[in-house]
Amino acid sequence: METTGCGTAIVTPFRADGSIDEPALRALVNWQIDAGIDFLVACGSTGEAATLDEEEWLFAIQIVVDAAAGRVPVWAGCTHNSTRTLLRQAALLRRVRGLDAVLSANPYYNKPSQEGQFQHFLALAQAVDPLPVVLYNVPGRTAVNLEPETVVRLVDAAPNIEAIKEASGRLPQIAALVHLLPRGFKIFSGDDNLALAAIGVGACGLISVAANEAPAEVGRMVRAALHGDWLQARELDRRYGRLYEANFWESNPGPVKTVLSLMGRTTDVVRLPLVPPSAATRARLERLAGELGLLKFAPAAEGYAGLF
């Protein structure tokens, strides 16, 4: 896998009736690519994959792949707590031509052991081979941690496991992965606020939530750090650090979609059990977005309204 830099865990826009808004999603993909983002991740946690039915999930992935048209790599989120169901869904991804990798998080709710996670991810890797697999360690959402030693076992057992999105929030764990894994293995921070620290210890990039709202700026920050321009990287991190925090004032992607709606790029519709942020949070988000200059193109909302 050659992919490095900043990837956006892109939202899935919904219309007012809750259906997937295909024109809005295509427009978001084009905007992200025009802004210089390095790759896109469709149907991850920020893409509300857990609330999409199987047909919608495949549809959203296909839209992102088609809209990207080979200009940047596209990864598809494919996660389930039942290994049998995961493998069935993984087989469906073979219909999507032009897909570059599969991103899969720890099995949630079941709280499997390290051996259980090993067998789960190995089965996925074998099912999609030769398509690259990106492990996604996010214990805050899944209640289990994928230990570095288990990642080493997986990489030894399945050559198409080529990267990991590490969102444990533990810098020592990222450092351990860097030290234990082959140099060609790619480690991406899954936390915007740890991106620079992760790159400092050897990560090769970031899979970002904030890049939904500020793709050019977050992408520039990551590339500056990767090229050793720490002055620019730190300045951008300092400026947008408030946005990283704000995106989790309430459950992700509620705040992100609110900011995108203020920017005129999509609605703020999320699917239950998620709900839009409260009026108080929305007011805070609008104030912050204005201070960061994210609303300077907000009049585009008038044109966007025609998509409904």
Image (cartoon, rainbow, N blue to C red):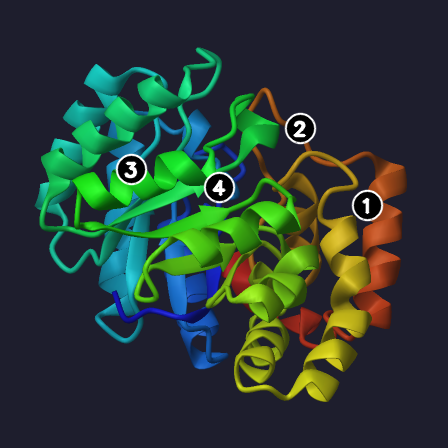
Tell me how far mark 2 sits from mark 4, CA to CA.
Answer: 13 Å
Label 3 sits on residue: 153
Sequence-wise, the earlier of marks 1 and 4 is 4
Q: Nearer the viewer, residue 281 or 183?
A: 183
Residue 176, position in %: x, y? Answer: 52, 50
For the point 75% across and 77% down, which residue is it? 234
Residue 49, position in %: x, y? Answer: 42, 34
Sequence-wise, the earlier of marks 2 and 3 is 3
Tell me how far mark 3 sits from mark 1, CA to CA.
Answer: 45 Å
Tell me how far mark 2 sits from mark 3, CA to CA.
Answer: 39 Å
Question: In the drawing, does residue 305 fall left or right of residue 152?
Answer: right
Label 4 sits on residue: 14
Tell me how far mark 2 sits from mark 1, CA to CA.
Answer: 12 Å
**Which amino acid does the dot numbered 1 rest on?**
Arg
The quadrant of the picture occupied by the N terminus is bottom left
Label 3, residues with CA under 10 Å away: few <14, some 14-19, many ≥20: some
Position above or below: 308 against 298: above
Q: Provide the secondary structure element on which disc 3 rests.
A: helix
Label 4, residues with CA under 10 Å away: few <14, some 14-19, many ≥20: many
Q: In the current view of this chain or complex, which residue is farthest to the top? A: 110
Q: Nearer the viewer, residue 267 or 252?
A: 252
Label 1 sits on residue: 282
Sequence-wise, the earlier of marks 2 and 1 is 2
Q: Provide the secondary structure element on which disc 4 rests.
A: loop
Tell me how far mark 3 sits from mark 4, CA to CA.
Answer: 40 Å
Q: Nearer the viewer, mark 2 or mark 4?
A: 2
**Which amino acid does the dot numbered 4 rest on?**
Phe
Residue 44 can be seen in this image: no
Sequence-wise, the earlier of marks 3 and 1 is 3
